[in-house]
Image (cartoon, helix red, strand yellow):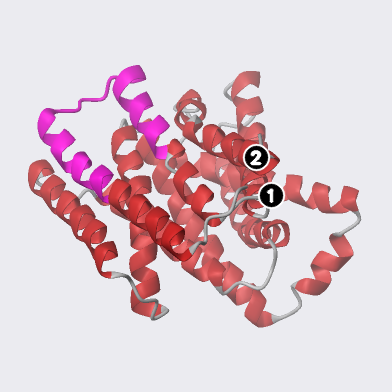
Amino acid sequence: MNKGIVYALAAYLTWGLFPIYWIWLHAVPASQIISHRMLWSCLLLIAVLLISGRLRKFRASIASARVVGIYLAAALLVGVNWLTYIWAVNAGYIIETSLGYFINPLLSVLLGVVFLRERLRPLQWLPIALAAAGVVYLTILYGRLPWIALVLAGSFAIYGFVKKTAPLGSLYGLTLETTLLFPFALGYLLYCQSQGRGAFLHEGAAIDALLVGAGAVTTIPLLLFATAAQRIPLSQIGVLQYITPSMQFLLGVLVYREPFSEEQLLGFGLVWAALVIYIAEQFFARKARGGLKPA
């Protein structure tokens, strides 16, 4: 099997199992979990740069105020995404989080059309319309906007849009993002400790290990994904990415027994149909152009 596919599978399978990890930390407030995630991710990435001898090159690459501004925006977006996701998982909304990541690719396409003047083929408008219909239907069914799904999809789609203009590679970019968030994360955690509300060193060794491990759990799949993206075609990445929300959906329904009605199935079905049509349209369009190459 192509090594790129192995790296991609490792990344998406890890992300698919994320709900289990964060549920193990359900006793810790989401704001503290995300702060530890930022803190330990930053320290781990700095250690990687030190060990690989690339710290000086990294420091030289971030000397521009424009570069820092781009990655500050990216850091804030990914922070909103992480906080919403962790809170939602521990509040029992795993199914709705999976909906967000099913919608995300189609929203990214729409952003490209609106802001980058990318042109869609006529059939590509159909999945966007179906996904929108699914969200509208679920809104009516819930009696509210599925805001968790929309915040997750929107924040990650805009994050991807910002990163499209970003000048740094994946390792340097992620290191800068976590470095920019590091002072806020550390300050908040020190404040929680001073108020007697800090979980770290107060909830047992297992919780401490999971909080420290959040750094590795965050950075390793991101680096695996970046490596995979360099080795396999984007079309394969596009198909494989649906492993993650599919696993999260199954965890929510089969493992954590979240309620899922036939009416909800119709709304999700519209989104799933949109994804199938979009992937199929891309596949046949590439094949017609002779653009599919063996991996």
The residue carrying pointer 1 sits among few (fewer than 14), some (14 to 19) or many (20 or more) residues within 10 Å by Cα, namely some
Q: Quadrant of residue 269?
A: top left
Q: Is residue 256 magenta?
A: yes
The dot on residue 42 is none
**126 on left or right of 220:** left
Provide residue 120's location: percent of width, then percent of height.
Answer: 33, 71
Tag 2 or tag 1, which sits nearer the N-term?
A: 2
Per the image, the residue denoted by label 2 is: 7
- Left or right of 43? Residue 74 is left
Which residue is rendered at x = 67% and y = 39% of the image? 2
Circle 2 residues within 10 Å: few <14, some 14–19, many ≥20: many
* Label 2 residue SS: helix
Q: Are marks 1 and 2 in contact (CB under 8 Å)?
A: yes
Q: Is residue 119 above or below residue 49?
A: below
Q: Is residue 86 visible?
A: yes
Answer with left or right where residue 90 lies relative to residue 232. left
Depth order, front residue of 93/247: 247
Towards the viewer: 11 or 20: 11
Q: Quadrant of the N terminus?
A: top right
**Does the rendering let one see residue 153?**
no
Segment colored magenta: 245-274
Residue sitting at 39 percent across and 76 percent down?
Answer: 118
Amino acid at the residue labelled 2? Tyr
Prevalent SS, magenta region:
helix
Where's residue 102, x and y in %?
A: 34, 46
Q: Position of residue 123 (x, y in %)?
A: 25, 63
- Label 1 sits on residue: 227
Measured from the top left, where is residue 146 in percent x and y? 22, 48
What kind of residue is marked 1? Thr
Residue lying at 39% horizontally and 47% vertically, measured from the top left: 84
